[in-house]
Image (tube, helix red, strand yellow):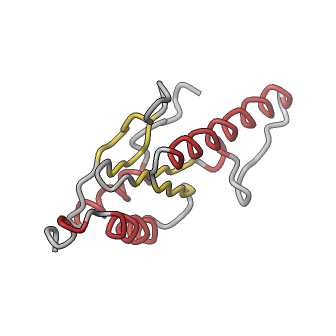
Amino acid sequence: MSRQASKDTAVELAVRRLLHAAGLRYRVEYPVPGLPRRRIDVAFPRAKVAVLIDGCFWHGCPQHATRPKANAEWWRTKLERNMARDRETTERLLAAGWTVLRFWEHEAPEGVAVQVAAAVQRRRPERTRGKNK
């Protein structure tokens, strides 16, 4: 597990590259307010938009998740805890007024970037909407 990338995955880098090219500026590995040791993959703090890109195996993708047969009970518990932690993080961010966008690693970065840009544009304060055009 120590060899698994937990940040700066190929998908995250592709999405960030597209967002930057579109003129959006963001924070990487931004702390989740009130939850130590949890991070937002790509955050827009002013607009309060949190982007989380989840790995299919680690976060239980309905299309691609697999269940290891060796040590099955340990893995089941581990993966269920991951999904519970995801739900708690989302709930905490929503309660704090954030828009939470969760994507799977198999989703096309171009589509993810378009959805993120639209959400940021909707959430931007009126006075800053026209600056990055």
Q: Quadrant of the C terminus?
A: bottom left
**Residue closest to the eye, 89 or 80:** 89
- Horizontal and vertical percent position of residue 21: 22, 65
Residue 106, image x and y in percent?
A: 56, 60
Total labels: the figure holds 0
Q: Quadrant of residue 126?
A: bottom left
Rendered residue at 72%/60% (across/down): 63
- Height in image: 55 above or below 101? above
- Residue closer to the observer: 72 or 133: 133
* Nearer to me, 82 or 11: 82
Residue 15, position in %: x, y?
37, 59
Q: State the image quarter where residue 127 is shown.
A: bottom left
Q: Relative to 65, is 94 on the left or the right?
A: left
Q: Is residue 23 left or right of residue 44?
A: left
- Judge by depth and name the residue closer to the eye, 78 or 64: 78
Residue shown at 48% from the left, 36% from the top: 5
| Quadrant in which the N terminus appears | top right
Residue 27 horizontal/vertical position (percent) = 29, 45
Relative to residue 19, is residue 88 depicted above or below? above
Q: Is residue 104 left or right of residue 41?
A: right
* x 59%, y 45%: residue: 91
Q: Residue at x 37, y 38 (%)?
A: 29
| In the image: residue 113, left or right of residue 52 | left
